[in-house]
Amino acid sequence: MPATAPTPTDRKFLGRLSLPERRYIADALRAETVGGVLLLIAAVVALVWANAPFKDSYHTVQDFHIGPAALGLDLSIQHWAADGLLAIFFFVAGIELKRELVAGELRDPKAAALPVIAAICGMAVPALVYTLVNVFGSGSLDGWAVPTATDIAFALAVLAVIGTSLPSALRAFLLTLAVVDDLFAILIIAIFFTSDIDFAALGGAFAGLAVFWLLLRMNVRGWYVYVPLALVIWGLMYNSGVHATIAGVAMGLMLRCTTREGEEQSPGEHIEHLVRPVSAGLAVPLFALFSAGVAVSGGAIADVFTQPVTLGVVLGLVVGKAVGIFGGTWLTARFTRASLNSDLAWPDVFAVASLAGIGFTVSLLIGELAFVGDASLTDEVKASVLVGSLIAAVLASVLLKLRVRTYQALVVEEERDDDQDGIPDIYEEDNPEYHLRMAAIYERKAAEHRERARLAGASRDEADRPA
């Protein structure tokens, strides 16, 4: 009896990526991993500096103002890091999102449904957890968005530190979650944390974006054209009252991320390749350096678990993220009949969901926006983000270590290239030329072993011959 053909709704979740997608993700995550390690170092330096005997110097540098006041840009160093440097981070996020939508995991609505729903649940459940804690604890609801973010660089740094290399499908799932997460974080910032709007400045920003778009469509090239224009757009967006990072996202989304005939990579991918090291290696670590410096003491740590605002952030990151992402994934797979890759198991999904509870960069930013004007509560929220991210990192590390041998075996299999043609063997199973090359390789090896057997036999006969 012939096998039943799979229905259109049967799909493989966490299945093998296409080779171009695998290579793109490997390159992207390699840069983010290095940036994540720098981010960890910057966070540690900030904490040590803010708690050292010379801690006053940290706040002096943090509050030092620089910039042209006539343009409304006389900002503190901390402000420049949050509104200026993070615009570069969100510019890269915009390119990532555009690429995912037109050439990556999100281009197929059916395939995109699962990670998108998982990401939405991974933001909604933490917000719900925070809200419940603060409703019953009579706390402030202003910080509901703080535990909704995932920091991909910090998560990858944790993987690098514990020495765990995830299979490409799990890494792609984590990256897609982070991209969708960034999209909704952008919307949250734009909608809920926009102050009084200066429509003249906002109109100027939109005009600048229109010029930016027109130049791209005219194939105008040259950083000396786009960088000054980008700075003007950013300055106008900042003065409009809309958070300045939105300018970075908008420009990233405008770049073309599909290749044309004769192109090895799209303009968006090329620019992302150039800018990502600046974002991951400079912008985000400097933001962490001037935002993560909070006073740490036994009493402060205890307060994190006793105050409703801070407890809501910790539980949102640790419990809400894991339950939201895993629950959204499992339910979507269950009702769309998407089957899990047989090489992986649902505990692997839960481990990655726990890893997504590391909310460092964007959570710190939203914490600053949510409680602006209340420096004490802002520092407490920052401390809760650090504690929650640390707990999530430890939990995810334990869960991932339990399956590390499985991951190592899968990674070795993914990277195996016995015919040494630069393409992993698992991508050539349907290529007749690959099998002919492998047959020739095995024939040469067989001939070598036959010759060694002959020589070994001759040597043994010589040794056994009477003197």
Image (cartoon, rainbow, N blue to C red):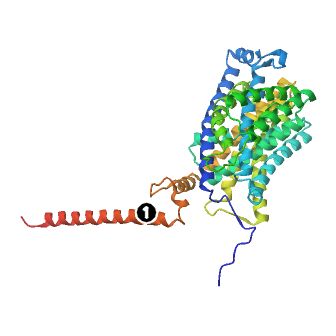
For the point 74% across and 72% down, which residue is it?
Answer: 7
Residue nearer the viewer, 164 or 454: 454
Residue 249, above or below 56: below
Q: Quadrant of residue 214?
A: top right
Q: Residues within 10 Å of mark 1 (few under 14, many from 20)?
A: some
Most extreme residue toward the left is: 467
For the point 80% across and 32% down, which residue is it?
Answer: 381
For the point 63% across and 64% down, which residue is it?
Answer: 342
Most extreme residue toward the bottom is: 1
Most extreme residue toward the front is: 218
In the picture, measured across the screen, residue 113 lies left or right of residue 193, that is left
Instruction: Indicate the position of residue 10 as horizontal and vertical percent values.
Output: 72, 68
In the picture, measured across the screen, residue 344 lies left or right of residue 423, that is right
User: Is residue 38 visible from the viewing direction of this image?
Assistant: yes
Quarter holding the C terminus is bottom left
- Amino acid carrying label 1: it is Arg
Quarter holding the N terminus is bottom right
Instruction: Indicate the position of residue 257 as horizontal and vertical percent values.
Output: 70, 46
Q: Quadrant of residue 40?
A: top right
Instruction: Indicate the position of residue 38 as horizontal and vertical percent values.
Output: 62, 31
Residue nearer the viewer, 44 or 282: 282
User: Is residue 197 visible from the viewing direction of this image?
Assistant: no
Which residue lies under the disc numbered 1? 437
Instruction: Indicate the position of residue 206 as horizontal and vertical percent values.
Output: 85, 34
Total labels: the figure holds: 1
Q: Secondary structure at mark 1?
A: helix
In the picture, measured across the screen, residue 405 lies left or right of residue 2, that is left
